[in-house]
Amino acid sequence: MKNLLFLIAIGAFLFGAGMLLVAQTAIHEIAAFSMFLIMAVCLSGAGIIEALHVIRKDLQELKKAPKQE
């Protein structure tokens, strides 16, 4: 899922940059910046998923570690 969101973010950025380069009206620019917003949301989602994955991995390691008393 993280990789899919990252790929969508890259695609949205490239599409937004392409739209911004050929924009002729303000509506085209708004659409391009909307793609940048979609890119930011997808990139944030990928970061959150990765952070949760790291936390889950750490918790599993703590669960397997022998208890010290």
Image (cartoon, rainbow, N blue to C red):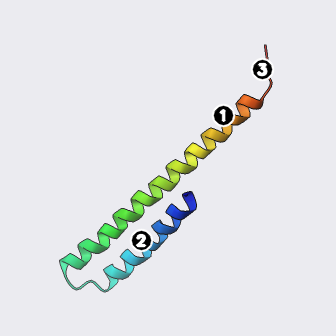
What is the spatial separation of the Cα atoms under label 3 and label 2, in whole angstroms? 47 Å
60 or 36: nearer the eye?
A: 60
Residue under the point 33% across and 81% down: 19
Seen in the image, is 19 located left or right of residue 12?
left
Residue type of the residue flagged with mark 3: Lys
Q: How many marks?
A: 3
What is the spatial separation of the Cα atoms under label 1 and label 3, in whole angstroms? 14 Å
**Image quarter hosting the N terminus:** bottom right
Q: Specify the label residue 59 is tagged with.
A: 1
Residue 18 percent coordinates (x, y): 38, 82
Residue type of the residue flagged with mark 1: Leu
Residue 32 percent coordinates (x, y): 31, 74
Q: Which sits earlier in the primary sequence, circle 3 or circle 2?
A: 2
Q: Determine which residue is flagged by label 2.
A: 12
**Image quarter hosting the C terminus:** top right
Q: Residues within 10 Å of mark 3 (few under 14, many from 20)?
A: few
Seen in the image, is 55 located left or right of residue 69?
left
Q: Determine which residue is flagged by label 3.
A: 67
Classify 37 as above or below 57: below
What is the spatial separation of the Cα atoms under label 2 and label 1, in whole angstroms? 34 Å
| Secondary structure beneath label 1 | helix
Q: Which sits earlier in the primary sequence, circle 1 or circle 3?
A: 1
Q: Are marks 3 and 2 in contact (CB under 8 Å)?
A: no
Q: Quadrant of residue 23?
A: bottom left
Q: Specify the label residue 2 is tagged with.
A: none
Residue type of the residue flagged with mark 2: Ala
| Secondary structure beneath label 3 | loop
Residue under the point 57% across and 62% down: 3
Classify 51 as above or below 66: below
Classify 26 as above or below 3: below
